[in-house]
């Protein structure tokens, strides 16, 4: 977030803010209520759990319907439809090699792409007939 960028250096360590709005006092107040400056690792775990939860929903859908063709706007579970649509887009990009090019172009590390389709996730989807 903007606040995190104001208060962290290039290596992610806290430093004195260059922006006068985030004073030392404000930084201390934020930290006194448990504000965390680094959240990537925790967010990765959150997104991993969320991906696994949606994968389980897709397994249930396949069990009931005999296929994985969830419509993008699936009324009984709109989130599942959106998630499946997103996985298909990411799958296509991965197969075309455009995902890697996009990562390089955006200058992002692999850690920043934890929410994207990984090889392991791709294999899991393919094994279920995605």
Image (cartoon, rainbow, N blue to C red):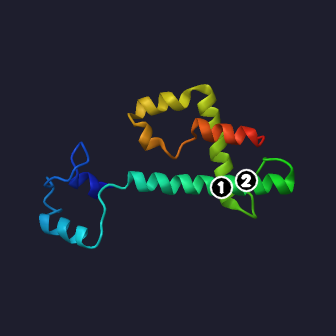
Q: Quadrant of residue 97?
A: top right
Q: Looking at the picture, does residue 42 appear above or below residue 90? A: below
Q: Nearer the viewer, residue 21 or 63?
A: 63
Check disc 2: other Cα within 10 Å, few if <14, some if 14-19, many if 20+.
many
Question: Can the viewer see residue 90?
Answer: no
State the residue at coordinates (45%, 33%): 103
**Which residue in the structure is indicated by mark 2?**
58
**Residue 41, how many percent across, how many down?**
41, 52
Q: Nearer the viewer, residue 38 or 88?
A: 38
Q: Nearer the viewer, residue 36 or 107?
A: 36
Q: Looking at the picture, does residue 109 appear above or below residue 3? A: above
Q: Which corner quadrant holds the N terminus?
A: bottom left
State the residue at coordinates (52%, 54%): 47
**Residue 19, how many percent across, how many down?**
15, 56
Q: Nearer the viewer, residue 2 or 126?
A: 126
- Left or right of 102, for residue 130: right
Disc tally is 2
- Left or right of 48, for residue 32: left
State the residue at coordinates (50%, 57%): 46
Label 2: state its secondary structure. helix
Q: Quadrant of residue 25?
A: bottom left
Question: Can the viewer see residue 119?
Answer: yes
Q: Which corner quadrant holds the C terminus?
A: top right
Evaluate if marks 2 and 1 touch, with contact meaning CB atoms under 8 Å apart.
Answer: yes
State the residue at coordinates (79%, 47%): 69
- Left or right of 66, for residue 119: left
Check disc 1: other Cα within 10 Å, few if <14, some if 14-19, many if 20+.
some
**Which residue in the structure is indicated by mark 1?**
54
**Distance from the alpha carbon under mark 2 to that under mark 1:** 6 Å
Label 1: state its secondary structure. helix
Q: Quadrant of residue 117?
A: top right
**Residue 56, how many percent across, how many down?**
70, 55
């Amino acid at each position: 977030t903007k606040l995190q960028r104001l208060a962290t250096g290039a290596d992610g360590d806290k430093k004195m803010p260059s922006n006068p709005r985030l004073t030392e006092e404000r930084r201390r107040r934020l930290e006194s209520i448990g504000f965390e400056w680094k959240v990537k690792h925790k967010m990765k775990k959150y997104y991993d759990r969320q991906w696994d939860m949606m994968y389980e929903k897709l397994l249930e859908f396949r069990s009931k319907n005999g296929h994985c063709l969830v419509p993008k706007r699936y009324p009984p579970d709109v989130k599942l439809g959106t998630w499946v649509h997103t996985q298909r887009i990411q799958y296509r990009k991965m197969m075309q090699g455009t995902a890697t090019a996009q990562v390089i172009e955006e200058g992002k590390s692999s850690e920043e792409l934890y929410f994207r389709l990984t090889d392991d996730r791709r294999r899991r989807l393919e094994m279920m007939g995605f």
